[in-house]
Image: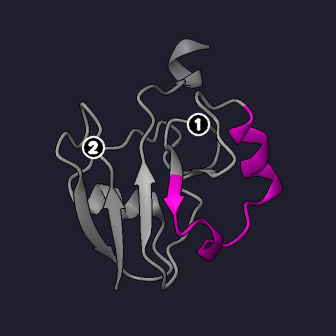
Amino acid sequence: MTTITVLPHTELCPQGKAIEAAPGTSICDALLQHGIDIEHACEKSCACTTCHVIVREGFDSLTAAEETEEDMLDKAWGLEPKSRLSCQAKVANQQLVVEIPKYTINMVKEG
């Protein structure tokens, strides 16, 4: 199992949290399985940016983002060089530290 440390987020995880995930699990699924209700408006199909996270540690352990994810990330609020869509980023064997941005853009609701 791999430890994912989630940094504090005012609404979703005020205290922060350390969770365990099996390698091959998406960051999004791991968060949801541990009660961190990250938004995923497109049902994890890589069609929105609501599950955007910033990987503060362990970024290089993730498989490279595919072109579709890169194109979607360009539309994310607060994009950083180590941003990923959590529905696409699969956990490997290296510990991760992730930050859920304060805001998200829901293109389904907001047009």
- In the picture, the disc for residue 49 is 1
12 vs 39, nearest the viewer = 12
Q: Tell which circle, 1 or 2, labels the residue nearer the N-terminal end.
A: 2
Quadrant containing the N terminus in the rendered view: bottom left
Mark 1: amino acid: Thr
What is the x, y in percent for residue 15?
A: 17, 46
Mark 2: amino acid: Pro
Write down the residue under mark 2: 8
Residue placed at 52% from the left, 56% from the top?
A: 55
Residue placed at 20% from the left, 53% from the top?
A: 35
What is the x, y in percent for residue 89?
A: 57, 63
Residue lying farthest to the right in this orientation: 67
Residue lying farthest to the left in this orientation: 15
Residue placed at 52% from the left, 24% from the top?
A: 106
Residue 86 seen in the current view: no
Give the secondary structure at mark 2.
loop
Q: Magenta residues, as a range?
A: 55-74
What is the x, y in percent for residue 87?
A: 53, 55
